[in-house]
Image (tube, rainbow, N blue to C red):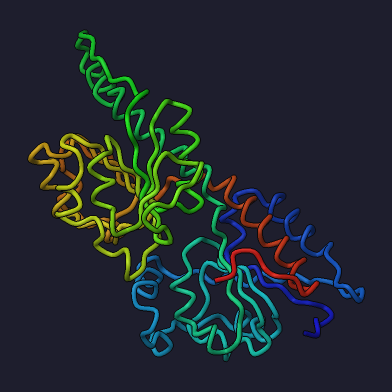
């Protein structure tokens, strides 16, 4: 493949998202320091494309639908800039980007999820797609561990009692010796596993690619999806971190929840589509689940009056388990490495 000179790379998110103009400028300078094997240069352009969360989620849920007809009109400078680019780092792109950017060869997704970008028909046009899987892994793993510790040590109850100015010791449980099950064993759960072991947990994992009898020295037991319910029955706590897909939607349904140990704790830091929320709330109401922590919901933002808002023993956060300051650095580290690989004709990291 002939690499154009200059090789024009678009950053398609607003620079204000980073929060530090100096850090953004340094990342741009780092990209522009890359040279192609024949001495060509990389040029970076800013073409911020920022869709509403609701449209992004809808595109991800149905990437095969025709999203071009409803594509909002873009500013003229963005439209003109897209015609010049060869690669892009993007959370969002217009649905008809393959016609708007005729020279586009490769898209680096800003996040781990890529279904909303698949809706651009990149593959049909021969455009390579890579993800930023792993860029959030450590921060989200730490968040999930925090929720587990909060639950078993009863931190929320202790805080509430202190605010009520009521003195009376509340004792938590010891973590050592408990079993935690991980649904999915990608980057996030792979970071949770050593952290859970450090607290003395026995760690189990369920992975799509696992077969019965497989082993992995990072965990104490590995299960295929067909044995998910068997794994759930062994777990005191369960953490889910899987992408949205036809295989994962509704996987944690009433039957899966019933398969969990009575009084188990469940935490979801992946995608809200995994969970039957009505069944989850019912299990909290009945006491079958002792606690739940959700960082994601099936509908985001969660509408007023939704049962999750008032469910007992449910800790809710707002898709904010990641650490943006670290995430931007990590995303650009992946992107810079892939730019270097792309212009050198090497295999890209996280190719979808």
Q: How far across and how far down the image is residue 284, in percent?
A: 14, 41
What is the quadrant of residue 292 in the picture?
top left
Q: Nearer the viewer, residue 109 or 47?
A: 109
Locate the C terminus and report the quarter of the image it occupies: bottom right
Q: How many marks?
A: 0
Q: Is residue 218 left or right of residue 261?
A: right
Residue farthest along the front direction in this orientation:
213
Q: Nearer the viewer, residue 242 or 204?
A: 204
Horizontal relation, residue 15 to residue 285: left or right: right
Residue at left 42%, top 47%? 320
Q: Position of residue 224 (x, y in %)?
A: 35, 56
Taking 99 as reference, is 185 above or below it? above
User: Would you say 164 lies left or right of 102 here?
Assistant: left
Q: Residue at x 22, y 39 (%)?
A: 314
Residue lying at 25% horizontally and 15% vertically, measured from the top left = 171
Which residue is at a point 44% across and 80% down the rendered structure image? Answer: 119
Q: Residue furthest right?
A: 39
Q: Residue 256 location, x and y as percent?
A: 20, 52
| Vertical comparison of 142 with 269: above or below | above
Where is the N terminus found, in terms of image quarters?
Answer: bottom right
Q: Position of residue 41 (x, y in %)?
A: 85, 72
């Amino acid at each position: 493949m002939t690499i154009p000179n200059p090789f024009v790379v678009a950053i398609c998110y607003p620079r204000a998202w980073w929060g530090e103009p100096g850090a953004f400028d340094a990342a741009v300078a780092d990209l522009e320091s890359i040279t192609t094997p024949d001495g060509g240069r990389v040029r970076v352009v800013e073409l911020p494309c920022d869709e509403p969360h609701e449209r992004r989620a809808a595109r991800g849920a149905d990437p095969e639908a025709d999203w071009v007809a409803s594509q909002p009109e873009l500013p003229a400078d963005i439209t003109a800039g897209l015609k010049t680019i060869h690669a892009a780092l993007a959370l969002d792109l217009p649905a008809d980007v393959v016609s708007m950017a005729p020279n586009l060869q490769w898209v680096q997704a800003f996040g781990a999820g890529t279904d909303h970008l698949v809706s651009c028909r990149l593959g049909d046009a021969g455009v390579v797609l890579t993800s930023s899987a792993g860029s959030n892994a450590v921060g989200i793993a730490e968040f999930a561990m925090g929720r587990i510790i909060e639950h078993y040590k009863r931190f929320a109850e202790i805080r509430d009692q202190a605010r009520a100015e009521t003195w009376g010791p509340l004792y938590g449980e010891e973590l050592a010796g408990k079993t935690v099950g991980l649904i999915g064993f990608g980057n996030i759960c792979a970071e949770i596993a050593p952290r859970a072991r450090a607290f003395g947990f026995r760690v189990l994992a369920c992975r799509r690619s696992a077969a019965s009898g497989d082993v992995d020295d990072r965990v104490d037991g590995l299960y295929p999806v067909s044995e998910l319910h068997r794994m759930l029955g062994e777990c005191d706590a369960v953490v889910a971190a899987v992408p949205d897909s036809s295989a994962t939607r509704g996987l944690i349904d009433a039957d899966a929840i019933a398969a969990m140990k009575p009084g188990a704790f469940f935490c979801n830091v992946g995608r809200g589509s995994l969970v039957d929320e009505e069944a989850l709330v019912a299990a909290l109401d009945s006491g079958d689940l002792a606690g739940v922590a959700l960082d994601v919901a099936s509908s985001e933002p969660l509408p007023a009056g939704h049962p999750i808002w008032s469910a007992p023993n449910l800790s809710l956060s707002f898709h904010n388990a990641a650490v943006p300051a670290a995430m931007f650095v990590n995303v650009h580290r992946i992107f810079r490495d892939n730019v270097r690989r792309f212009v050198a004709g090497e295999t890209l990291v996280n190719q979808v």
